[in-house]
Amino acid sequence: MKVKEETIDRIRKFTGDRDWDKFHSPANLAKSISIEANELLECFQWSDDDYDLQHVKEELADVLVYCRNMLDKLELDEDEIVNMKMSQNEAKYPVDKARGNSVKYDQF
Amino acid sequence: MKVKEETIDRIRKFTGDRDWDKFHSPANLAKSISIEANELLECFQWSDDDYDLQHVKEELADVLVYCRNMLDKLELDEDEIVNMKMSQNEAKYPVDKARGNSVKYDQF
Amino acid sequence: MKVKEETIDRIRKFTGDRDWDKFHSPANLAKSISIEANELLECFQWSDDDYDLQHVKEELADVLVYCRNMLDKLELDEDEIVNMKMSQNEAKYPVDKARGNSVKYDQF
Amino acid sequence: MKVKEETIDRIRKFTGDRDWDKFHSPANLAKSISIEANELLECFQWSDDDYDLQHVKEELADVLVYCRNMLDKLELDEDEIVNMKMSQNEAKYPVDKARGNSVKYDQF
C-alpha cells in the first residue's frame, strides 16, 4: 500500500516538532538521500542474496522519508514529477529496442 | 499530491513491457537508487542555491521510481515501512533533546 | 605525502591475512567505494563548515583503501589511469572556457 | 604503479589554471567523490561481470583525483591517514574473528 496522507502528516509533524526545517535545504536533503541510499546499498555490500530484510526496510524507508522532505521543501507534486519522468523514460526506451536488454538509451 | 495508483501501474507496465524485471534484483535496485540519488546530488555539486529545478525534478523522480521498483520486488507495504521507521525515529530523537539541533542520536 | 609502497603492502597483507580477496569482486569494491564516500559525505550532511576533521580523515582513508583494493584487483596502474583521465579533463575543459566557472563541459 | 609526484602537480596545475580552487570546499569535494563513486558504480549497475574496463578506469581515476583535491584542500598526508585507518581496521577486525567471513565488526 502506498503511503497514506496521515503518514505524510506524521513526517511533517516530526520535522516541525524538532524545528528541523531550517536544516532541510534542498542541497542538504540531496546529500541525505544519497547517504541513506548508501546505507541501503550497504545491506548488499558483500552479497546480492544474503541480506537482512528488516534492515533493508528501515533503510529504504529512510530514503523515502527524505524524498518526502524534498518534495515538501520544493513544493513538488510527486504524482506530476513521476509521470513527467515516466513519459521521458517511455520515449527514451522504446519497447522494441529496450525489450530484454539493459543497454543504456544513448547506446541504441 | 502523492503518487496515484494508476501511476504505480504505469511504472509496473513500463518494466513489464520491457521484460526488465529480470534485472531488478534487490541488489541491483539498491545500486540504482544510489546512482540516481547521486545524479540528484550532482544538481547541487558546486552550489547549494543555484540549481536547475527541472533537473532536480527529473532526478528525484528517478529515485522515487527505483524505490517503487524495490517496494514491488520485495512486496513491501510503503505505508507500513515508513510508519515503522518513523516510530524508530521518534524514539531515537525525543523532541526535548533534538529540538533545533542536528546532533546525531548517538551523541545525545 | 603520498602513500608509501610499504603502506600499500600493509593494505594487501590486511586483505590476505583475512582471506577477504574472495569478497573483493570489482562490483563489490565499487559498492564499497560509494558506501565509504557517503560516510565521508555524512560529515558534511547538515553543515559545510562545521565538520569533525578526525572523522573526515578516517572516512577519506576508507575511500582510498577501497580504491587501492580495486586498482589491485583489476591490476591497474594508478599513475597511468590518472594521467589518462587528466588528459581527457584538460581537453574537455579548456582554460579559456572553464576559467573561474563551474559549468559542465557539455554546456560550453 | 602508484601516482607520481609530477602527476599530483598536474592535478594541482589543472585546478589552479582554471581558478577552480574556490569551488573546492571540503563539502563540495565530498559530494564530488560520492558523485564520481556512483559513476563508477554505474559500470556495475545491472551486471557484476559484464563491465567496460575503459569506463571503469576513467571513473576510478575521477574518484582518485577528487580524493587528491581533498587531501590538498585539508593539507592531509595521505600516507599518514591511511596508516592511521589501517591501525584501526586491524584492531577492529582481528584475523581470528574476521578470517574468511564478511561480518561487520560490531557483530563479532
Image (cartoon, coloured by chain):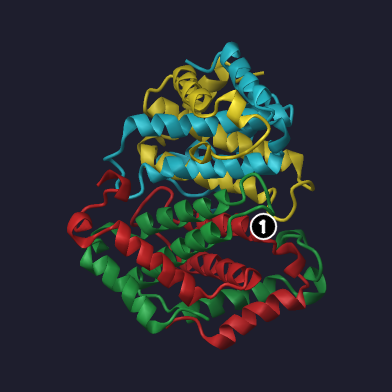
Chain colours: A cyan, B yellow, C green, D red
Tell me where residue C60 appears, x and y as whole percent: 51, 62
Query: Quarter-wise, where is residue C88 in the image?
Result: bottom right
Q: Is residue C62 above or below residue B94?
A: below
Residue sitting at 74 percent across and 39 percent down? B54
Q: Is residue B107 above or below residue A8?
A: below
Q: Is residue C55 rendered to the left or right of residue D101?
A: right
Badge 1: residue crowd in 10 Å (few <14, some 14–19, many ≥20): many
Tell me where residue C71 appears, x and y as whole percent: 40, 71
Residue sitting at 66 percent across and 38 percent down? B58
The answer to whether residue B13 of the structure is visible from this angle is: no
Q: In the rendered structure, the residue with mark 1 lies on which chain?
A: D
Q: Is residue B33 rendered to the left or right of residue C25?
A: right
> Nearest the camera: C103 or A83?
C103
SS type, badge 1: helix
Q: Is residue C106 rendered to the left or right of residue B104?
A: right
Name the amino acid type tagged 1.
Asn
Question: Circle 1 is placed at which residue position?
Answer: D28
Q: Is residue A100 above or below residue B6?
A: below
